[in-house]
Image (cartoon, grey):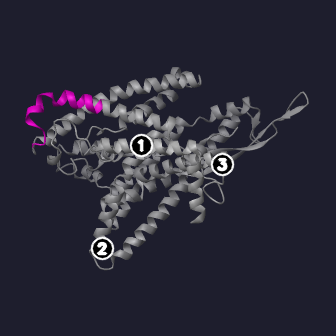
Amino acid sequence: MKKLIQTLKNIWSIEELKSKILFTLMMIGIYIIGTKIVLPGIDPSRIKDGGGAGSGILGLINTFSGGAFNQQSIFALGIMPYISASIFMQLMTVLVPSFQKLNKEGESGRKKINQYTRYLTVAVTLLQASAYVTYINSLNASNDAMVAGFRPYFWITSVFVLTAGTLFVMWMGERITDKGLGNGTSLIIMIGILHRLPQSFAEELTNKSVRNGQILVFIIEIAILIAIIMGCILLIQGVRKVPVNYAKQIVGNRQFGGARQFLPLKVNSAGVMPIIFAQAIIFIPTIFANFNPEKGKFLMALNDHSNFWYMLIYAIVVIGFTFLYTALIFNPKQIADNLKQNNGFIPGVKPGQPTADYIGSIMDKITLPGAILLAFVGILPGIAQRFGVTQGFSSFFGGTSLLIMVGVILDTLQQIETQLLMRQYDGLMKSGRIQGRQTASAVQM
């Protein structure tokens, strides 16, 4: 406890770090307030509970927006359009030669890609806002939540407000990244997820407390949740270290190079993206099942996260997407070329194509267990539901929510620890150093 208090004092004594924390908290507070502001023309007292988005891609959007989607807020679309645009541009830099060249131009190229991402975000937001307004129109038609006199103007004003809201959230995320602590976009998503935790925790506690002997079960659930979180930390930080030697160079009377370092290859290079893609893909068949409920019972079962067939198909899709996404973002040939240019080599492996083949074979071997573990984490909420955990609380036992929370918290703590070490303070822990997702994935040269 004394060590914790001293660490907090050290953090607060660093003026730059203190200003970053306060700025981040201020931006998060503004975002939370914005999620409570309802769209113009809607009576908040008549909005139905849940708004209709419970699972599938709509549930995912509602999760990322901190419940603003169901509340028909001005931040209803949250940061999702920006994420979609960013993913698309990331794939373009891998698949399209002109974008590959742009990505290799350094800071100027990244600025152009960021500008294209913002333009694409506007287009995506306009499309999603139009679909969302149509969606809430159908919901509000039955409960008169919309003010009658405002109906003629509702579509145009809502599309405009939703687009402006998403762009404002995007701006806040960028400001947090520049002047605050951690990655702003990731922090906003994490706050949206954590927003549901107190209510879900209270619901689970209430559900267990009304039955005799269930409090012990609740305590066991918390212990299992802690163990799962520790496992997710290992999955996120797990790397295979490939030894790399650098040739000695003598310039004048000085010697350079000759150091032995490691090339860290992540067990889970794809991060949380396979789970997001899998949820979106599995949701598509349920749309067609709605047209014929009698014949589409199997497809509708894909909406039930505790259903055996859902978990099996979901796990297979996650494993497939993990290999696909890893192949898209991980380029062994580029790493081999970088090593060759820096006079680096892997002991016992020839430079060039043999090095690329060697790195690729190692990546294939570690991606398989990483994909299986990621699929297992993805179906953990369904397994928790089958053991009697409430639906809201079970979502924190795995899946997108847990992976994002653990990854963002690790990144943020790693930044705090870096600031402390720069000022010759001790780190956040007595032994070892915290590694975020970015640290674990960085190629050491």
Viewer-closest of 363 and 33 = 33
**Which amino acid lies under the numbered mark 1 shown in the image of this protein?**
Met
Residue 71 lies in quadrant:
top left
Rendering coords of residue 98 (x, y %): 52, 20
Residue at position x 41%, y 72% from top?
A: 219
Residue at position x 79%, y 41% from top?
A: 259
**Which amino acid lies under the numbered mark 3 shown in the image of this protein?**
Leu
Q: Quadrant of the N terminus?
A: bottom right
Q: CA distance from mark 3 to mark 2?
A: 45 Å
Q: Is residue 66 above or below residue 117?
A: below
Viewer-closest of 377 and 73 = 73
Q: Which residue is mark 1?
A: 26
Rendering coords of residue 149 (x, y %): 8, 32
Query: Helix or strand or loop: what does disc 2 sit on?
Result: helix
Q: Tell me the magenta residue range.
A: 144-163
Residue at position x 41%, y 59% from top?
A: 397
Q: Is residue 147 magenta?
A: yes
